[in-house]
Amino acid sequence: MEMSSIVYERFYEVLYEHFVGKTWTKNGQGVPDSNSGVAWHTKNPDTGKLWFQEFFGDVVSNPEHFLRKRKEIDRTKASVIQLKDPLLVRAFKLMDFAIPDEIDKSRPSHGQRAAILYQFFLESHFPEHLVENRADLEVFDHKTRKLIHNSREEKNNNDSAPMTDDQLRAAIDEKAVRQLIARFYECIWHSRQEEAWELLAPAFRKRAWKDNFDSFVIGYTNTVAIRNLHVFDINRQGGPGITCKVYYEDDVVTYTSLELGNIGKISVADLENFTERIGRLKEAAGSAGIEGFEKIELQKFFEPAFSEYVWYKCGMKPESITELLPSMETQAIHRLKAISCIRLDDDWLINAIGPIKLHSLR
């Protein structure tokens, strides 16, 4: 779920107050300042485990998770904080908020639970924010004791029939998928690869990277920034899956050489020159001990991310590419991906990421 940075400040203070109120042992010392991580590392004297682990351990492992997110806030501009729905549910439970029995009996998802409890939190601690964003944030009607369908993304046109509960759940799932993908690429951009890794389905981690986190990290080594992310064409598959397309601009560090200079402007008349250039690159690859270079498809030599493809194809470490392509520069590369998401134990996770080929219209 997304939470504005302004609300998160209030959320953190309330959470911290309840956490230390239930865990901190007063031994003649005052409660640590909320900007300190000391309280988050206190242990339950009966079990010897961190209180944080007992409350949140199987959702997030870092005891300073909430504090770290607070420290990342740039107070000079508006921003949003991404939090896992199950983590939010536990945090709100720690604050003594609870799902109404009428709703709990229908076994709502973590996303629905988080949205309801978030509304309750705002009603108690930040009502003005709820009033200003009621169309987005109000999901439970206290009078009827039912879920309501008035989110700006989910509300009906005046001429349409009311949404069913299934339609509402589908809309909430779609929003959760959008937030999941946005959070994944935000983590990649800001070098929070461990957090990004946790957003991938276990089967996908095993299938794509053989459960090797270091291999996953290498794949995004050269990413400098990710901009203009758009999630679209969202479709529900049979069962728990959702597919969509994602576009973004990827600023990456690329490597080139004199042989590749202006190669994209070569014409048919320059075919002999092109052959000579590729020959020199092939020889340089052999001298650098790069295996499999001769199997690279010729079309790849014309792409801006050629160096990225070489170390993928030849099983090289990214830093080794400079032996073959010594000139470094940063380029904006347009990415179009097909992404599949799956819900496991009420958590949405990314289950596949694949490229979609871009073809010129002419």
Image (tube, grey):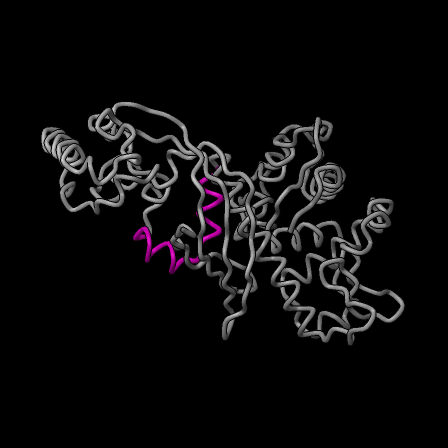
Note whether 78 is above or below 203 in the view shown: above
Tell me the quarter of the picture where residue 206 sits: bottom left
Which residue is located at x 75 percent, y 37 percent? 6
Look at the image and tell me whether residue 289 can be seen: no
Which region shows up in magenta? 192-210
Which residue is located at x 40 percent, y 51 percent? 362
Who is closer to the viewer here, 4 or 282?
Answer: 282
Q: Main secondary structure of the magenta part?
A: helix
Q: Is residue 82 left or right of residue 207?
A: right
Residue at the far front: name it: 269
Look at the image and tell me whether residue 20 can be seen: yes
Q: Is residue 207 magenta?
A: yes
Tell me the quarter of the picture where residue 39 sits: top right
Q: Is residue 347 left or right of residue 259?
A: right
Who is closer to the viewer here, 203 or 222?
Answer: 222
Note whether 241 is above or below 57 in the view shown: below
Q: Is residue 218 magenta?
A: no
Which residue is located at x 66 percent, y 48 percent? 2
The percent position of residue 305, horizontal first and vertical second, equals 34, 38
The percent position of residue 315, horizontal first and vertical second, equals 22, 42
